[in-house]
Image (tube, coloured by chain):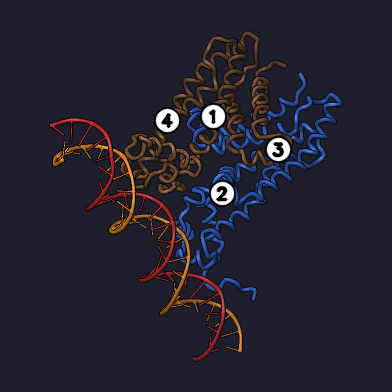
Chain colours: A brown, B blue, C red, D orange
DNA sequence: AAACAGATTAACAATTTTGTTAACACAAAG
DNA sequence: CTTTGTGTTAACAAAATTGTTAATCTGTTT
């Protein structure tokens, strides 16, 4: 006899979990509340019992994952006291790993932002704040290192966008990249491991003096 | 028998045009046939008259735009007889311009591929074929130039993915990038112009010997 | 002009999806 | 052991979306 048979308080979190999966995979419009409920193993009435509407459930997911966009950007730049080059190497790697651990987060965010521009205008602002504080530091550091002749004077904003572009693409466009690489790799993760190294080199290469 | 359109202009193409916009913006699930009809300036019955179902209309759009994915990859590498470096510069620029002229095509394709993996498995194959023939040439050329000491020996596949990553991202993630750049530029197109140059340099920098 | 054929519309029907309600189950407290 | 409150369910209702039909219009053909 399982004690979790009827009155289990974890149905709410089960719904959230199932909803996250559904929303991430199919987007807001494509997600079906019935499908979410089925995945969670409950009636779809429960979904309304806990979250009133599909919209409010979606908002719960959004606000929960919103901080991750922040982390996604922040993880691109290390925060310790290593030499700049090493910090950037670590930053790129951490950023790559972060996206790897949240593979469909970028696509989801981009999608919902473009199809509901109003709903998430807050995010645009917060993105700006994060990027601003991030870039102010990075920009100053690069200038300092460049003045000392240790690296080229590259634009911090462009460098940040380079990092995010290179790291996000192999996950966001995974099905297409998979098609392009064909059978050159055992599996996709093997390719990703190489890609991570390649991205680090590409970024550091932009800083090298030659 | 040549006179196909009896009454109004070509409503069929107007519907197709409106449908493309709707599908590209909101994806298959988010698109509304009524909205498409309204944009086209006709009753939504016309949509069914010409295309039976939403599904068949979608397929029409897909097959029509499918060749563009091909072009998108092919445009990444020039096809004339300039020196390799110049060819790549031209290729990157043409690729950038192509995406710029089809700004939401990448997001659309990626989305539909991930939410209907079965429907478009053909594309995975064709992508592979294109990439294969493209890379075979590029790979040989890079090796040749590298042997002559004109450039570093970089992996052609990685270079291709670099190009596509860097060029696609500022369009695919436009709302987020817009947030990040804040008020550093007059408008987004001004940023894009600089970004295009930056991408060319980033790619060519990977080939330079130092 | 009459007949004809494709194009168009409005009203309607079917289906899908979301949201609600009322009854029921069960554990804990009085 | 009743009461009480929350969790649960099935059946229902409402809304939204897709798909259909029959009647109408318009240009073309005979």
Q: Residue at x 56, y 43 (%)?
A: B107
**Chain letter for mark 1:** A
Determine the secondary structure under disc 1.
helix
Alpha carbon of mark 1 to alpha carbon of mark 2: how far?
A: 23 Å
Determine the secondary structure under disc 4.
helix
Which residue bears the numbered disc 4?
A125
Alpha carbon of mark 2 to alpha carbon of mark 4: how far?
A: 33 Å
Q: Residue B201: x and y, percent?
A: 68, 28
Q: Are marks 2 and 4 on the same chain?
A: no
Image side of residue C29 versus residue B42, left or right: left
Q: Disc 1 vs disc 3: which is toward the camera?
A: 1
Q: Depth check: B120 or B59 in front?
A: B120
Quadrant location, the C terminus of chain A: top right
Which residue bears the numbered disc 1?
A101
Alpha carbon of mark 4 to alpha carbon of mark 3: how far?
A: 37 Å
Which residue bears the numbered disc 3?
A181
Q: Depth check: B201 or A39 in front?
A: A39
Q: Residue A150: x and y, percent?
A: 65, 11
Q: Earlier in the sequence, mark 1 or mark 3?
A: 1
Q: Which mark is residue B116?
A: 2
Q: Which mark is residue A189?
A: none
Bin the neighbour count of mark 3 within 10 Å (Cα to Cα): few under 14, some 14-19, many 20 and up: some
> Can the viewer see residue B103?
no
> Can the viewer see residue B155?
yes
Determine the secondary structure under disc 2.
loop
**Chain letter for mark 3:** A
């Amino acid at each position: 006899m399982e004690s979790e048979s009827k009155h289990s308080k974890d149905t709410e979190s089960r719904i959230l979990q199932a909803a996250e999966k559904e929303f991430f995979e199919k987007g807001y419009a494509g997600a079906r509340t019935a499908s979410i409920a089925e995945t969670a193993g409950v009636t779809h009435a429960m979904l309304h019992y806990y979250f009133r509407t599909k919209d409010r459930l979606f908002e719960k997911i959004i606000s929960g994952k919103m901080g991750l966009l922040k982390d996604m950007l922040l993880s691109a730049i290390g925060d310790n006291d290593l030499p700049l080059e090493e910090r950037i190497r670590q930053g790129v790697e951490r950023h790559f790993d972060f996206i790897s651990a949240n593979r469909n987060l970028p696509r989801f965010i981009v999608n919902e932002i473009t199809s509901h521009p109003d709903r998430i205008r807050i995010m645009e602002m917060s993105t700006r704040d994060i990027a601003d504080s991030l870039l102010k530091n990075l920009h100053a550091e690069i200038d300092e290192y460049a003045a000392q002749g240790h690296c080229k004077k590259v634009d911090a904003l462009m460098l940040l966008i380079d990092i995010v572009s290179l790291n996000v693409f192999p996950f966001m466009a995974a099905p297409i990249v998979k098609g392009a690489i064909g059978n050159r790799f055992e599996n996709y993760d093997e390719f990703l491991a190489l890609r991570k190294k390649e991205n680090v080199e590409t970024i550091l290469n932009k800083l090298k003096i030659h």
